[in-house]
Amino acid sequence: MEFSVKSGSPEKQRSACIVVGVFEPRRLSGTAEQLDEISEGYISNLLRKGDLEGKSGQMLLLHHVPNILSERVLLVGCGKERELDERQYRQIITKTINTLNETGSMEAVCFLSELHVKGRDIYWKVRQAVEAAQDVLYSFDSLKTRKAEARRPLRKVVFNVPTRRELPIGERAVSHALAISEGITTCKNVANMPPNICNPAYLAEQAKILENDYDKVTTTIVDEKEMEELGMGSYLAVGRGSVNESLMSIIKYDGAGDDSKPLVLVGKGLTFDSGGISLKPGAGMDEMKYDMGGAAGVLGAMHALVELNLPINVIGVLAGCENMPSSNAYRPGDILTTMSGQTVEVLNTDAEGRLVLCDALTYVERFNPEAVIDVATLTGACVVALGAHATGLLSSHNPLAHELLNASEQSGDRAWRMPLWDDYQDQLESPFADFTNLGGKEAGTITAACFLSRFTKKYNWAHLDIAGTAWRSGKNKGATGRPVSMLTQFLLNRAGQEQGE
């Protein structure tokens, strides 16, 4: 799919389709008014007859509009002009791309990027449009023997900007969006892969591919033998019941070209989580292949980062593991010694993600990081608290938390901060070990983060719980690619390239 920007008048466009907006009630956008004037009232006459009201998401495809050079004109309902917000804009773009893809228009010039969206500039509108287009055109069909293909699929979209002065920022928006979309696609592809293919070794292979494809990337794999030598008893215990070896992949990106402290992203990579001895219910267990969504998100963010070629140092860690029941599996009641030397009483083997992450978080101390962000499908409690709309954010460092919240607002990949007060730490008390791996039914997302916080005292740290946002269930089941957009925006901001300046 090809995307670009231009600045031109609608009447001069010779394309398979021109896309313009119509507001409620039957109010033409500025571009649509120009087309109406050239066509001698053809469009406004149709609206008066009731063909289109202008409600958000309505579509009306016109062929051979008088005096218009393009073959088609697609009128897109945009709702009430003063109420057009970010969410509605993305929905309109998504519906538009779907419609274009189904009508045989292999290319289009889209003027929706000129619409006024409250508080958003042309960079945001073009970038969001490209990301939304890539998202709606994505499909995971690599394992299907019969692939459904459109007869004349959409291949090229040009987004119009109001003036030539805005072309450079529009071009940057396209460039950023394409890099981020590549990262999102990487994340989706890996997360959607079935667990009989995507195991810890597969994650390691994907990390190696980045090293092979990009000069600034080096990848190292930590296997179980090395984990044993390092004392990563907690990480090793979780994978003990599986025939698939636990592997931790370390992806180093040297973009700064100096010894400046790296930012570290740590992704939970449970390529399948059966719950172990504390076995999960059978219904919906197939979706536990998505328990490596954190590792997929980190891999996707690293892919976007190298495409953007940002001048910063970043390390991505994919904590690959599989949690299975067997005669060798770890048990409720076991006491594990973590890499940090702290001991943990296991109350539930299905609270395994934190047991893997805690050793990974100790391991990354050696990098003397500027900041560490872990990403994990960690708790069902986060889904109860925030649903599928916002990622849970918990942090012991206010400036880092604010940076991530800002990145989430800029990218539209939203997060919501939850408390991490010491009051909750008491729920982890154990009579036999330093603490337990479960804090009880109340505040499950917070107590899980409290557990992780005990391993992050030596650096600035934030935790992203993506249990509700990493994938969708139901008939449209599949990975969402989140939080690649948020993480990449955070990295753009850290590199001083918020909009590519």
Image (cartoon, rainbow, N blue to C red):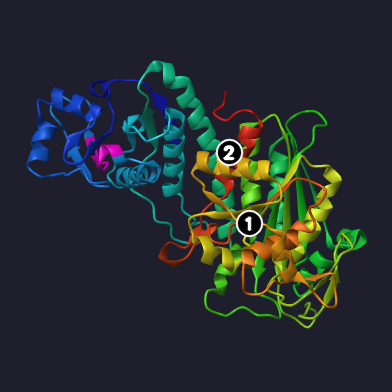
Tell me which residue sits at (36%, 35%) in the image. Answer: 117
Q: Position of residue 64 (x, y in %)?
A: 16, 33
Residue at the bottom extreme of this rendering = 327
In terms of secondary structure, where does tag 1 sit?
loop
Tell me which residue sits at (38%, 35%) in the image. Answer: 118
Residue at the spot of label 1 = 419
In which quadrant is the C terminus drawn?
Answer: top right
Tell me the magenta residue range: 73-82
Q: Where is residue 18 in the image (x, y as percent from the top left)?
A: 27, 32
Closer to the camera in the image, 162 or 288: 162
Residue 489, disc:
2
Residue 442, disc:
none
Residue 125's place in the image compared with 274, above or below, is: above
Q: Is residue 497 left or right of residue 214?
A: left
Residue 173's place in the image compared with 377, above or below, is: above
Q: Which amino acid does label 2 sit on?
A: Gln
